[in-house]
Amino acid sequence: MTFTRRVMMTAAAAMVAFAGTAQADGHQMLEDLHFLIPGGAGGGWDGTARGTGEALTEAGIVGSASYENMSGGGGGVAIAHMIENADSMDNTVMVNSTPIVIRSLTGVFPQSFRDLTLVAGTIGDYAALVVQADSPITSMDDLLTTFQADASSFAIGGGSVPGGMDHLVAAMAMEAAGEDPTGFNYIPYDAGGAAMAGLLSGEIQALSTGFSEAVALAEQGEVRILGVTAPERVDAFADAPTMMEQGIEVEFVNWRGFFAAPGIDEAQVEAMRGAIAAMYDTPEWEAVRARNGWVNIHNPGADFEAFLEAQEQQIGDLMRTLGFL
């Protein structure tokens, strides 16, 4: 579970190669770019697409950006639309994230990332396990000790269905700690807010959530972050310890990135990749990134493919262990 570090190191070299030349003369790399968003307004995909478009246009890398929300089928409607209309999508990129891997594995839709042209992964959000701020559980060791003392009454909650991302992250952590990943109670909630209410009410002892959400809650004094699935401490909240530094070898990131239609002209794909790479070196992007609490995880082209294949293997193995595949 250490593929993220390798991808990030490779991507850093690629970013330097693209970014220095792209922005040196303020060159516009794309005249326009259309963002296809597989969910509704206000969600994570929507924010990622619009924030990326904002940075690209304000930095002068892209002349203009447009946006189209296309909900349905867990993202499957937008994927099918892109494939079926590939001939007219030369300037279109679709945003997606880890659910494209999970939902493909579980058959929510028949396509996978292999049916699209991979442009680049751009940002990520690590996961975290948190407890109430005044909980006697102060570390992952404490959590494991509490679980071992009375597994039947110990529950971890999350804002996703059984077999969804929050469940998988908790199971990864338990497995890496030497516990049976099927041996704890997972309580699903409809959304993060409901899950947080369950934690504060004592219905669950710990909550599996995104790191950026955990940071917001920790800064409000509502939770304590026990462990983060990052390879090293994240600057956004450096007080939060990683799982790894506590001896739990688990690393996981909920990435977000962009895909183009199958069969798109390679020169156009390279222009898209170059524009995204150049974006990282701009103050416009840093403003967007910091505002949203995102972590830069840039992996273009073949690196993106290797990253997705590794994550598919990681998630698929765990889902088979949990009985979801």
Image (cartoon, grey):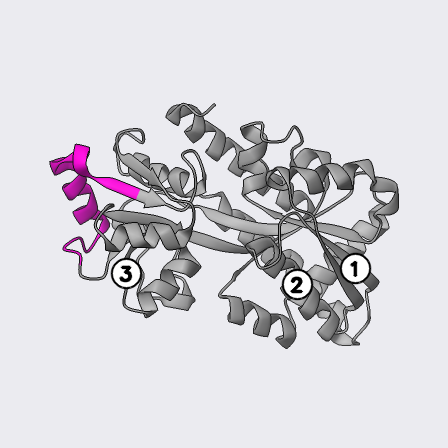
Q: Quadrant of the N terminus?
A: top left
**Mark identifier at residue 197:** none
The magenta stretch spans residue 146? yes
The residue drawn where x is 29% and y is 50% is 198
Q: Decide which of tag 1 and tag 2 comes sooner along the chain.
A: 1
User: Residue 194: x percent and y percent?
Assistant: 36, 51
Quadrant hosting residue 211 = bottom left
Quadrant hosting residue 50 = bottom right
Disc 3/disc 2 C-alpha distance (Å):
30 Å
User: Residue 37: x percent and y percent?
Assistant: 67, 51
Q: Decide which of tag 3 and tag 2 comes sooner along the chain.
A: 2
Horizontally, residue 168 falls left or right of residue 133, namely right
- Asked if the residues shown at circle 3 and circle 2 are in contact, with their CB atoms under 8 angstroms apart, the answer is no
Disc 1/disc 2 C-alpha distance (Å):
11 Å
For badge 1, the amino acid type reads Leu
Q: Is residue 228 among the parts visible in the rendering?
A: no
**Residue at the spot of label 3:** 223
**Mark identifier at residue 50:** 2
User: Residue 206: x percent and y percent?
Assistant: 26, 48
Q: Secondary structure at mark 3?
A: strand
Q: Decide which of tag 3 and tag 1 comes sooner along the chain.
A: 1
Q: Secondary structure at mark 1?
A: strand
The residue drawn where x is 17% and y is 48% is 142
**Residue at the spot of label 1:** 33
The residue drawn where x is 44% and y is 53% is 126
